[in-house]
Image (tube, helix red, strand yellow):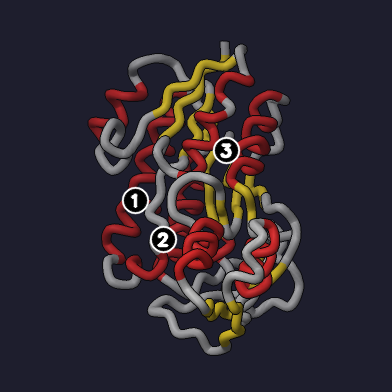
Amino acid sequence: MIQILVTGADGQLGQCLRKIENQYPEIAFDFYNSKQFDITDDDHIQKVMATKHFDYCINCAAYTNVEQAEQTPELAFAINADAVEKLSKACSEQNCILIHVSTDYVFDGTKNDPYSTSDATNPINVYGKSKLVGEQFIQKTLNKYFIVRTSWLYSEFGKNFYKTIVQKAETEEVLTITTDQTGCPTNANNLAAYMMNLIQTKSEAYGIHHFTDGEAMTWYGFAKKILFENELQDKVRLEKAQNYRTLAARPKNSVLQ
């Protein structure tokens, strides 16, 4: 029986993993949300990790509010960087393979082509910087790890762009969406299946991976697709916005290869 510890279990990805738990009878999952498992607390990490020998730890816990991170950088780094270092050390002591979710925002967006796993990183906002430091801690601490960078996650769970567009289409007449950024929307259910495949196949392709659903588009293009999929294209007028102002700088191109 393969033992898997999942942190951040109440987030989008954690709930997607919960949904498919029964598809893997040969795997025992232990799901912990942020209240049950505080990954910023060394003692708490040791206590949870001591409950059994875990073969894998899937770290879905993260500070993902890109805008708020600019105002509370200490909290972003505490969760996305310092806590990841603590978790990595605990995994090292237990010989547990870490599967860690990272982001396209470790890149600055100045490249015209999709980013490969070997491209130089250069985050331009606090969120991206905190996630990159977390990656670096893992690389320094562990030999057996998977850092899975992904982008523009959405699902039926939690708050995300997809659900927001559907909700706003029901209540607003006009939606103004930026054309300034290009990336790859990724269904968190597909990301969950990808990570489970790494485990099922006992992959030893350790290191940095990129996973997206592969279709590059702007936020405007994604919104258009969402409205069409939900037959809402006639209920709301979609308008393009350039120079859409946000507190956090955003990479113009964050398409992952």
| Mark 2–mark 1 CB contact (< 8 Å) | yes
| Mark 3–mark 1 CB contact (< 8 Å) | no
Q: Quadrant of the N terminus?
A: top right
Upstream in sequence: badge 3 or badge 1: 1
Above or below 174: residue 233? above
| Mark 3–mark 2 CB contact (< 8 Å) | no
Above or below 37: residue 75? below
Q: Residue at x 55, y 23 (%)?
A: 21
Query: Mark 1 highlights which residue?
Result: 79
Instruction: Choose top left, top right, bottom left or bottom right for residue 38.
Output: top left
Residue 77 in sight: yes
Above or below 75: residue 98? above
Q: Is residue 254 left or right of residue 163?
A: right
Above or below 240: residue 119? above
Query: Mark 3 highlights which residue?
Result: 145
What amino acid is at disc 2?
Ser
Horizontal and vertical percent position of residue 105: 54, 65
What amino acid is at disc 1?
Ile
Q: Quadrant of the C terminus?
A: bottom right
- The front one of 90 and 234 is 234
- CA gap between label 3 and label 2 equals 18 Å
> In front of the other: label 3 or label 2?
2
Horizontal and vertical percent position of residue 47: 27, 23
Q: Residue at x 43, y 38 (%)?
A: 88
Residue 130: image tag: 2
- CA gap between label 3 and label 1 equals 18 Å
Q: Residue at x 47, y 78 (%)?
A: 249
Q: Residues within 10 Å of mark 2 (few under 14, many from 20)?
A: many
